[in-house]
């Protein structure tokens, strides 16, 4: 049983009652594996790839069979411009040719020999496959961003809970010291009640933090495509995540899927121009037919000497002469679409260059803010420690101690906000430079 559980954990398969631990990389892989959007996009890519086989199948011999059973309830009358009896040289004759029952069994085969659209159709489908792959890349980037944000939110809430626990521990110690002062008569009852109130508020903050952590974990499970009943926890802490954000990324916004998609659309419109012009070219096909025809005065397909075979083969040339300039007009439309694609590419590159510059500056500023808030929190902790000692020694009034405590809480809050702002700025920078 233990061996089975180890295997399931290695494969990251949800097990009832077992808590799974995820690094950020594992969480991203899990999300890409489980999300329905990715699965559907892969299926669309598979459909596009199978289209090539359909195109090739159109160039295989197309063979069909037919069976026709006919009962001529009234034969057609034909007028001959002479008298078949010879009695009236200037007369005519009414005759009926045929028999009441005609049965026909035949095989028809058609084979394409030349069609200028074949290569273009294959190229268009290859372009469609590329577009599907780009759509998959877009979905991948969106899901990686969503999972990363959810993972960061869990770490942030856990850090908030840690700070709230430290604040609660401080209130416990402060209340114990205040109780001693109160019992000795050196602290007013109202001031002692303030310490009790601080402890109660700190306890509520811890309970709220526990709820926020659970909600953040629930969001992370959703983004990873895991059921709500799954038990998970994040493996990396804040310091580990921050250490991984120290890498520098090249400004490769040309890797953005939006640019690839527009380039693919440009190529598709060029192929559509060629396809429209190819409609003016000739097509050549071969065909053949083998049939058996029964002529009988009664309905009996098994009558002897009533079946007569015939067959033929041929080559067909179809040459368009005039179609009202439809091909030319459609080709012009696609050429205009190409100009739109070129304009869109120019705008996208300008947008992404600006986005890269902006996100770079934002990330640099966020990192500076983070470094400053780290210094501030250390300074606030030092000031509070000294003021706490001075208060316990009786040389500092309670209001000054409370001011120091408030400054420490404010520094901790600014620190958490700076962390989250920096992580989101780093994500935005990765996306802008095509590295997410």
Image: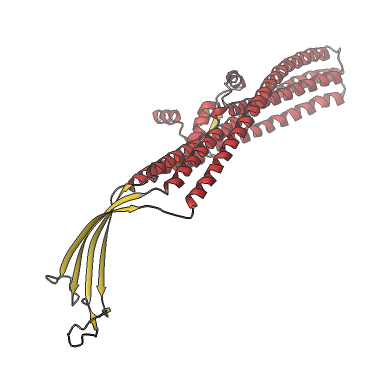
User: Depth check: 213 or 138 in front?
Assistant: 138
Among the 4 quarters of the image, the one containing residue 432: top right
Residue at 65% in and 32% down: 210
Furthest toward the bottom, the residue is: 87
Residue 164 position by quadrant: top right
> In the displayed structure, does residue 321 sit left or right of residue 379?
left
Vertical arrangement, residue 262 with respect to residue 403, above or below:
below
Give residue 420's position: percent from left, percent from top. Answer: 66, 26
Vertical arrangement, residue 107 with respect to residue 156, above or below: below
- Can see residue 18? no
Q: Most extreme residue toward the left, as rendered?
A: 304
Find the residue positioned furthest to the front: 90
Q: Nearer the viewer, residue 305 or 162?
A: 305
Q: Is any atom of residue 280 visible in this view?
A: yes
Residue 311 in picture, x, y percent from top left: 20, 60
Q: Is residue 47 left or right of residue 227?
A: left
Total labels drawn: 0
What percent of the width, then of the height, locates residue 279?
42, 49
Q: Nearer the viewer, residue 356 or 368?
A: 356
Q: Would residue 393 be found to the left or right of residue 417 on screen?
A: right
Place of residue 35 in the rendered image (x, y in percent of width and height, measured from the top left): 51, 38
Quarter of the image where the C terminus is located: top right
> Image point 75% across, 26% down: which residue?
199
Pick the quarter of the image with the N terminus.
top left
In front here: 115 or 390? 115
Q: How has the structure been colored for display?
A: secondary structure
**Vertical placement of 258 versus 402: above or below?**
below
Q: Residue at x 44, y 54 (%)?
A: 322
């Amino acid at each position: 049983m233990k061996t089975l559980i180890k295997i399931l954990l290695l494969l990251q398969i949800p097990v009832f009652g077992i808590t799974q631990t995820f690094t950020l990389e594992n969480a991203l892989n899990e999300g890409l594996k489980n999300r329905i959007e990715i699965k559907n996009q892969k299926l669309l890519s598979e459909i596009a790839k199978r289209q090539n086989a359909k195109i090739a199948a159109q160039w295989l011999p197309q063979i069909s069979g037919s069976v026709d059973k006919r009962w001529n309830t009234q034969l057609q009358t034909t007028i001959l411009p002479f008298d078949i009896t010879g009695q009236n040289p200037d007369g005519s004759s009414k005759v009926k040719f045929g028999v009441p029952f005609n049965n026909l069994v035949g095989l028809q085969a058609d084979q394409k020999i030349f069609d200028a659209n074949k290569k273009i159709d294959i190229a268009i489908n290859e372009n469609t496959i590329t577009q599907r792959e780009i759509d998959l890349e877009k979905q991948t980037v969106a899901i990686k961003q969503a999972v990363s944000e959810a993972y960061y939110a869990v770490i942030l809430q856990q850090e908030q809970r840690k700070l709230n626990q430290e604040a609660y521990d401080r209130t416990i110690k402060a209340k114990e010291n205040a109780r001693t002062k109160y019992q000795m008569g050196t602290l007013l009852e109202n001031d002692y009640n303030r310490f009790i109130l601080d402890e109660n508020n700190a306890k509520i903050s811890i309970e709220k933090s526990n709820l926020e952590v659970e909600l953040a974990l629930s969001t992370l499970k959703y983004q990873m495509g895991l059921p709500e009943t799954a038990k998970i926890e994040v493996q990396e802490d804040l310091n580990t995540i921050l250490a991984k954000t120290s890498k520098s990324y090249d400004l490769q916004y040309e890797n953005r899927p939006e640019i690839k998609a527009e380039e693919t659309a440009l190529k598709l419109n060029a192929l559509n121009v060629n396809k429209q012009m190819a409609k003016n070219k000739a097509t050549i096909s071969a065909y053949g037919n083998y049939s058996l025809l029964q002529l009988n005065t009664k309905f009996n397909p098994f009558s002897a000497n009533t079946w007569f075979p015939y067959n033929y083969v041929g080559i067909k040339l179809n040459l368009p002469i005039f179609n009202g300039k439809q091909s030319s007009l459609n080709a012009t439309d696609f050429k205009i679409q190409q100009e739109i694609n070129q304009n869109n590419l120019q705008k996208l590159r300008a947008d992404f260059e600006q986005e890269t510059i902006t996100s770079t500056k934002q990330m640099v500023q966020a990192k500076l803010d983070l470094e400053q808030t780290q210094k501030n929190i250390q300074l606030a902790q030092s000031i509070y420690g000294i003021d706490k000692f001075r208060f316990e020694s009786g040389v500092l009034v309670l209001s000054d101690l409370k001011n120091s405590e408030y400054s420490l809480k404010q520094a901790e809050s600014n620190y958490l906000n700076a962390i989250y702002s920096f992580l989101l700025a780093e994500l935005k920078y990765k996306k802008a430079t095509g590295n997410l």
